Every structure is written in structure tokens, then in C-alpha cells.
Amino acid sequence: MHEDQYFWPRPSAVEYMAGSDTSALAFSGASNFGPTNATLARTVRTRDEMFRTANGLTASTVVPPDMLFASGSGLDPHISPDAARLQVNRVAVARGLSPAAVALLVEEHVEGPQWGLFGAPRVNVLKLNLALDALQ
């Protein structure tokens, strides 16, 4: 599933298996579960527990929603800077790097809002993980 030496992306409703061949892969898409759906509630609790455990977070640490809910397409490559920052220690330990070096790399990969106007700052997880690989 997720590897400790990499930053984890936003959850995917289609498990990042989108494609055009429907016999083997699913198209992109969301779960279509509403806010009162029991399956969605269980899924979010499971994701929360998994993220907290993997990253050694306390019960009082707020897990960003982008680590709990899949995007509308299920294929969003971006996470919030807060979601990336919460993963720094896990990635640093797994790679034998200093947390400060990994934290600096995260900050170098924070992108501003689209065209400087739309949305919030974000981190492209693929680009961040490729930069991590380039360090070693």
C-alpha cells in the first residue's frame, strides 16, 4: 500500500488504478458517498487511524481532510502543506535523513495558488517524492 520512505498522496476512490481499459482498470471517479453514509464514515476513521499510527501523531493532532477524503476525480496529485509536514518525521526516519533536511525539501515544493489566485497552497506529492529520490 503506502511506503514509509515516501510521502503519501491523497486517498484515491479508485486506488490510483485509472485507465481506459475497463476490463483491467477503473476510470477516475469519486465514491459518491454522501456525508451520512456509514461506509464513508468507516473509511474516514480507518484512514485517520492509519495516518496517525504511521506518522506517530497524538490524538489531539488534527489530520488534514485531504488525507482522509478522496478528491472528486480520485487522482489528485496534490496534498496540503500541512499534510506533507505531518509526514516529515516518518519519511526522514525511513530514509535515514535528518527531519530538517526533509522539512526543507517540503517547503521548497510548496506551490502557491493556481495562477496566484485560485485555491490554496499545495504540494505535488510525485514531484516531492522524485526530489527525495534524487537526494540519495
Image (spheres, rainbow, N blue to C red):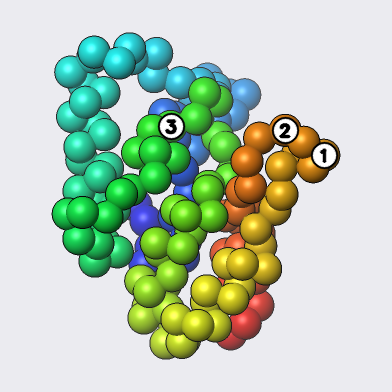
Q: Say which residue appears at 39% left-offset and 38% top-offset.
A: 65
Cβ–Cβ under 8 Å for marks 1 and 3: no
Q: Say which residue appears at 52% left-offset and 74% top-offset.
A: 103
Cβ–Cβ under 8 Å for marks 2 and 1: yes
Q: Earlier in the sequence, mark 1 or mark 3?
A: 3
| Residue 51 showing in the rendered view | yes
Instruction: From the viewer's perspective, tell me whether residue 52 is left or right of residue 66.
Output: left
Instruction: Kindly indicate the quadrant of the structure image that contains residue 27.
Output: top right
| Residue placed most toward the observer, 54 or 113 | 113
Q: CA distance from mark 1 to mark 3?
A: 24 Å
Q: Callout 1: 10 Å neighbours few (<14), some, many (20+)?
A: few
| Callout 3: SS | loop
Query: Relative to 99, does residue 28 appear above or below in the rendering?
Result: above
- What amino acid type is highlighted by mark number 2? Phe
| Residue 17 showing in the rendered view | no
Q: Earlier in the sequence, mark 2 or mark 3?
A: 3
| Callout 2: SS | loop
Q: Which residue is mark 3?
A: 70
- Position of residue 110 measured from the top left corner of the image (x, y, whole percent): 65, 58
Q: CA distance from mark 2 to mark 3?
A: 20 Å
- Position of residue 134 measured from the top left corner of the image (x, y, whole percent): 65, 77
| Callout 1: SS | loop
- What amino acid type is highlighted by mark number 1? Trp
Query: Relative to 9, does residue 91 appear above or below in the rendering?
Result: below
Q: Which residue is mark 1?
A: 115
Q: Callout 3: 10 Å neighbours few (<14), some, many (20+)?
A: many
| Residue placed most toward the observer, 24 or 9 | 9
